[in-house]
Image (cartoon, helix red, strand yellow):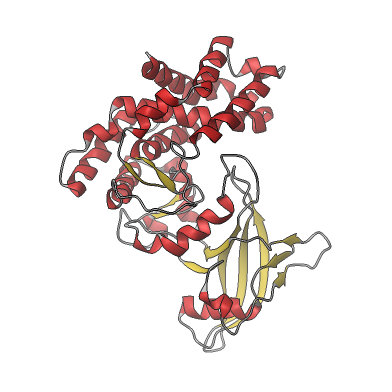
C-alpha cells in the first residue's frame, strides 16, 4: 500500500460522496490508495478504494481516480497540470460525448465551504509518502475495468462508434472554438515550441550510438528539415476550420458502452482530457488511426475509410458538406505533424524498449508518417 497526501479533508471527501451517491448521511471509512501507471505527460494517477457505510448502515466500497497535474516542463506537457481540471470545470458538462463524472476538482465549491482546506493522508503512513499538494487536480469516477480493456478486441462497430462520437464532439464547436488560454494548440500557439523540443530530441537520437536503428540518415534529414521550418505544414493545417479537439483520441482513452451502461453518443465514455485543445479535426482523426495502428496492428479501417465514416456523420450534423476540412492533404499533414512533434521524445525516452520493436515501429508509424510528409512537401 502506498501513502498519499490528498489536497482535501476527509469531511470534504465525505460531502462529495454524499452528493455523488445521493446519500445525505453516508459515512466514509478507510481510504486505500494505489498508484497507477501515468501517461507520457507524467501526471500521477491513483486509484482510491473507499470504504463507506451507506444510509442504512451497510458497509460498501467505491473506487475513484485521483489525478494531479505533473509540473513537468516541455512543450508536450505544457500546462497539463491544470488543463484537465479546468476542462471538467468549464467544458465537460456541455459536450455531446460522455466524460467521467467529477466528484471534486481544484475549483469545487465544497473546498470553500465549511469542510475546509485540510489535507487527508491516506495509506500505510510510510516515510516515502506521495505528496499531492499541486495547484490543479481532479477526483473522478473510476470506469469499470472491463469497459476500458482490452481494446485489442475492438471490432469494426467499435471503431465506427468512436469515429461517430468524434464527429459529434467536433461538430458542436465547429469553427466556434472556446476562448480559454489554457487550451492546448498543437498546430497554433504551441506549435513552434513543440518543434523546438522535437528537434532537440532528434539531435540527441542522431548522436546516440543506437540512433541509426530508428532513422536512416536521409530520414533524419527530412524530419529535421521540417522542424527547422514547420510553416509549410502548419499552413496546410491552419487553413482548415478549427474545433475543440481531444488531443489524444484513441481506444486507450475510450470506455465502451457495454460496461458503462450509458446511452447517448455511441454509448462511449471518453476520458484523459489532459491534451484537450483547439485545432483542426484531422489532428484527432489522425491520432485515432495512427495510435491504434501502433498499439493494435491491423485495424478494421484505413485512415481514408475512417475519414469517410467521419464525414458522413459530420456533414449530417452540420447540414452541409465539410469534406474540404478533411482533405487528403490535411490528413497527411496531421499524420506527419503528430509524428514529428510526438514520437522523437517518445523514442528518446523509451528507446531501450522500442529497439526490440523497431521493425514494427517503422511499418506502423514511421514509414506512413514519412510518406505523408513526402506528399505534403512534394
Of residue 162 and residue 111, the one placed in the foreground of this image is 111
Image quadrant in which the C terminus is located: top left
Residue 93, given in percent of the width and then of the height, sits at: 38, 64
Left or right? Give the position of 52 relative to 340. Answer: right
Of residue 289 and residue 220, the one placed in the foreground of this image is 220
Residue 239 appears in which quarter of the rendering?
top left
Name the residue at the left extreme: 319
Residue 314 appears in which quarter of the rendering?
top left
Left or right? Give the position of 192 relative to 350. Answer: left
Residue 196, given in percent of the width and then of the height, sits at: 58, 30
Residue 376 vertical position relative to residue 248 in the rendered view, above or below? above
Image quadrant in which the N terminus is located: bottom right
Residue 323, given in percent of the width and then of the height, sits at: 22, 34
Residue for point 65% across, 51% down = 71
Name the residue at the right extreme: 127
Residue 23 visible: yes
Residue for point 31% across, 51% down = 173
Residue 258 appears in which quarter of the rendering?
bottom left
Residue for point 45% across, 49% down = 276
Residue for point 52% across, 64% down = 140
**How many numbered marks, from 0 up?**
0
Of residue 368 and residue 176, the one placed in the foreground of this image is 176
Residue 347 vertical position relative to residue 2 in the rendered view, above or below? above
Residue 143 visible: no
Residue 54, given in percent of the width and then of the height, sits at: 54, 84
Amino acid at each position: 500500500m502506498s501513502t498519499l497526501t490528498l489536497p482535501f479533508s476527509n469531511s470534504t471527501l465525505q460531502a462529495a460522496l454524499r452528493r455523488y451517491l445521493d446519500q445525505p448521511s453516508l459515512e466514509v471509512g478507510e481510504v486505500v490508495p494505489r498508484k497507477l501507471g501515468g501517461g507520457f505527460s507524467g501526471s500521477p494517477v491513483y486509484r482510491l478504494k473507499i470504504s463507506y457505510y451507506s444510509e442504512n448502515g451497510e458497509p460498501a466500497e467505491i473506487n475513484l481516480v485521483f489525478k494531479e497535474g505533473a509540473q513537468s516542463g516541455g512543450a508536450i506537457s505544457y500546462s497539463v497540470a491544470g488543463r484537465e481540471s479546468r476542462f471538467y470545470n468549464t467544458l465537460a458538462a456541455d459536450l455531446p460525448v460522455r466524460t467521467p463524472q467529477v466528484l471534486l476538482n481544484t475549483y469545487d465549491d465544497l473546498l470553500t465551504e465549511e469542510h475546509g482546506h485540510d489535507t487527508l493522508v491516506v495509506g500505510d503512513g510510510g516515510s516515502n509518502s506521495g505528496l499531492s499538494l499541486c495547484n490543479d487536480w481532479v477526483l473522478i469516477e473510476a470506469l469499470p475495468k472491463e469497459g476500458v480493456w482490452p481494446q485489442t478486441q475492438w471490432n469494426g462497430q467499435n471503431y465506427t462508434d468512436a469515429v461517430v462520437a468524434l464527429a459529434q464532439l467536433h461538430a458542436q464547436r465547429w469553427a466556434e472554438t472556446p476562448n480559454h488560454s489554457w487550451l492546448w494548440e498543437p498546430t497554433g500557439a504551441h506549435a513552434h515550441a513543440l518543434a523546438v523540443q522535437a528537434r532537440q530530441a532528434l539531435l540527441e537520437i542522431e548522436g546516440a550510438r543506437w540512433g541509426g536503428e530508428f532513422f536512416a540518415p536521409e530520414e533524419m534529414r527530412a524530419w529535421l528539415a521540417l522542424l527547422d521550418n514547420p510553416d509549410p505544414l502548419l499552413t496546410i493545417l491552419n487553413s482548415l476550420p478549427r474545433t475543440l479537439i481531444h488531443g489524444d483520441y484513441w481506444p486507450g482513452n475510450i470506455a465502451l458502452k457495454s460496461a458503462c451502461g450509458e446511452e447517448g453518443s455511441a454509448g462511449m465514455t471518453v476520458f484523459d482530457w489532459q491534451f484537450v485543445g483547439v485545432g483542426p479535426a484531422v489532428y484527432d482523426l489522425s491520432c485515432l488511426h495512427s495510435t491504434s495502428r501502433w498499439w493494435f496492428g491491423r485495424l478494421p479501417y484505413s485512415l481514408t475509410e475512417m475519414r469517410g465514416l467521419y464525414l458522413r456523420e459530420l456533414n449530417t450534423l452540420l447540414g452541409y458538406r465539410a469534406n474540404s476540412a478533411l482533405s487528403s492533404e490535411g490528413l497527411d499533414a496531421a499524420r506527419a505533424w503528430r509524428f514529428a512533434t510526438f514520437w522523437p521524445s517518445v523514442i528518446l525516452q523509451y528507446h531501450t524498449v522500442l529497439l526490440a520493436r523497431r521493425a514494427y515501429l517503422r511499418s506502423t508509424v514511421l514509414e506512413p508518417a514519412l510518406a505523408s510528409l513526402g506528399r505534403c512537401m512534394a
